[in-house]
Image (cartoon, rainbow, N blue to C red):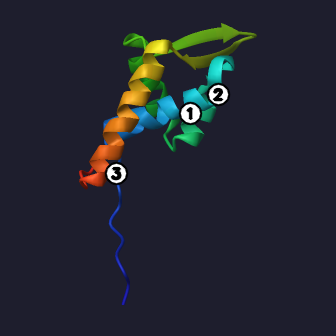
């Protein structure tokens, strides 16, 4: 008898939180989109779409140097990430799925 495993889907807030986490880990040197996609387990297209959304809201910056585009978290992005972590900790404690 096969055991069926329920697929866990992340909410958009979960995905955004992971992208911000990846950007935080890389600091001011930034990170390229393929690394964001790989580390956040997203397709290249989805990673670009979410990063553009974060840029539009001032949470990430895009930098181009030597034909390479990298993404860097802003101060506003750092503050949002920290607040999201507090929320997610509480959500886990009271078993809210996010």
Sequence order check: which comes first, mark 3 or mark 1?
3
In-image side of 73 versus 1 (left or right): right
**Spatial separation of the CA atoms under disc 2 and disc 3:** 25 Å
Which quarter of the picture shows residue 58?
top left
Instruction: Point out the frontmost of discs 2 and 3.
Output: 2
Residue extending furthest toward the right: 66
Residues packed near mark 1 inside 10 Å, few (<14), some (14 to 19) or many (20 plus): many
Which numbered dot is residue 9? 3
Q: Is residue 21 above or below residue 73?
A: below
- Estimate the x, y position of residue 7 in percent, counting from the top left: 35, 61
Identify the element where label 1 is drawn: helix
* Mark 2, secondary structure of its residue: helix
Which residue is labeled 2 in the image?
Answer: 26
Q: Is residue 12 left or right of residue 17?
A: left
- For image coordinates 56% across by 12% down, the residue present is 62
Residue matched to label 1: 22
From the top left corner, tell me how far across and down residue 95 is, in percent: 25, 55
**Front residue of this view, candidates 76 and 46:** 76
Q: Is residue 66 visible?
A: yes
Q: Label 1 vs label 2: CA separation?
A: 6 Å
Q: Would you say the residues marked 1 and 2 are in contact, meaning their CB atoms lie under 8 Å apart?
A: yes
Q: Residue at x 48, y 29 (%)?
A: 20
The one nearer the camera, 59 or 40, is 59
């Amino acid at each position: 008898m096969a055991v069926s495993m329920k697929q866990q889907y992340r909410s958009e807030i979960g995905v955004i939180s992971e992208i911000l986490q990846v950007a935080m880990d890389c600091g001011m040197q930034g990170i390229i989109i393929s690394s964001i996609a790989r580390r956040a387990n997203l397709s290249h297209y989805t990673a670009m779409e979410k990063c553009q959304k974060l840029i539009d809201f001032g949470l990430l910056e895009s930098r181009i140097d030597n034909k390479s585009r990298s993404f860097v978290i802003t101060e506003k992005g750092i503050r949002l990430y920290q607040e999201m972590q507090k929320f997610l900790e509480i959500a886990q404690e009271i078993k809210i799925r996010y």
